[in-house]
Amino acid sequence: MWLLAVMSAWLVACSAGGGATPAVLAPVRAPIGCERLEYALVQDGVTLGTGTLQSRVQEDGSWALRQAYVSTTNTEHLDETEAVVTEAFAPRSSSRLVANMGNVDQVATEYRTVEGRAVATFTRATTGEAPGKPADLRLREHAFDNESAFWLWRALPLEEGYHARYTSVNAFERSQSTVDLTAVGVVGVTVPAGSFEAWRVLVVSGRATRTAWIEVAPPHRMVQWDNGVAFMQLVTDSSAAAGCSAVGAPVR
């Protein structure tokens, strides 16, 4: 299995269920205005790749949230995404590029309102194929772009028993899914970047349950993510080296 293609938020078009009715997911803080975090992708103690999460504020006041995953064994494998969102994480656009041995698959998404309904328009381009025609998906309520998930979860008012639900839009699959989040407590977790007190957050989509560890202290970095195949572990916060003048400071 190609690890890089599954290290972004992984969510599939299934509905979550069971348990008490959760609250509607509502972020309480904006994304970090300038940040760069570096991760290792680890499976059974073997490092299979690296990942980088970067955020910045654009001139129009939106946030660009970027992910890049590179294999340590084959440099021809690459997975890159960007989600453009508002301060409240409302999606404006997103893109994803997956390159594998010279073949490139790209999907671009634009979010808009048509006759009062939120719509995502997907356009796909694949090496060796004719450009795909734009395809529309009418969105359910409380929809967020899947590629913003690693930032969205950090912006939540996590506390013991926190339980919320939202709709995740997966442009690569042209689908949307219901996602439940539950904070099950604070635990100690050690990753290459050090030891942290972190919220252990269960992420449920359909029959799949995954786990994120979100730093309790500001800036609430995601220090570890278990997607069921491998662990994504924080190695270093290189925000200062990336030119961020106020590392860890949200822009308001």
Image: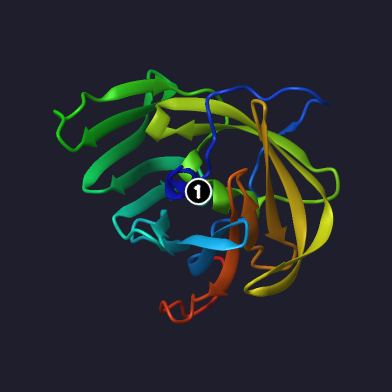
**Position above or below: 40 against 109:** below
Which of these two is toward me, 57 or 133? 133
For residue 147, say whether it is visible.
Answer: yes
Which of these two is toward me, 89 or 71? 71
- Image coordinates for residue 11, horizontal then vertical, percent: 54, 35
Task: Write the residue at 85% across / 43% down.
Answer: 161
Tell whether 35 sits left or right of 103.
Answer: right
Q: Residues within 10 Å of mark 1 (few under 14, many from 20)?
A: many
Task: Write the residue at 22% across / 35% down.
Answer: 125
- Image coordinates for residue 88, horizontal then vertical, percent: 54, 47
Tell whether 166 sits left or right of 127.
Answer: right
**Position above or below: 216 against 96:** below
Tell whether 157 sits left or right of 74.
Answer: right
Task: Write the residue at 39% across / 59% down.
Answer: 70
The residue carrying mark 1 is 7
- Image coordinates for residue 132, horizontal then vertical, percent: 21, 26
For residue 32, say whether it is visible.
Answer: no
- Tell me the colour scheme of the image: rainbow
**Position above or below: 118 against 44:** above
Quadrant of res 108: top left
Tell me the kind of residue under disc 1: Met
Quadrant where the image shows the C terminus: bottom right
- Image coordinates for residue 134, horizontal then vertical, percent: 25, 25
Q: Number of numbered discs present?
A: 1
Which of these two is toward me, 182 or 22? 182
Which of these two is toward me, 242 or 224? 224
Q: Secondary structure at mark 1?
A: loop
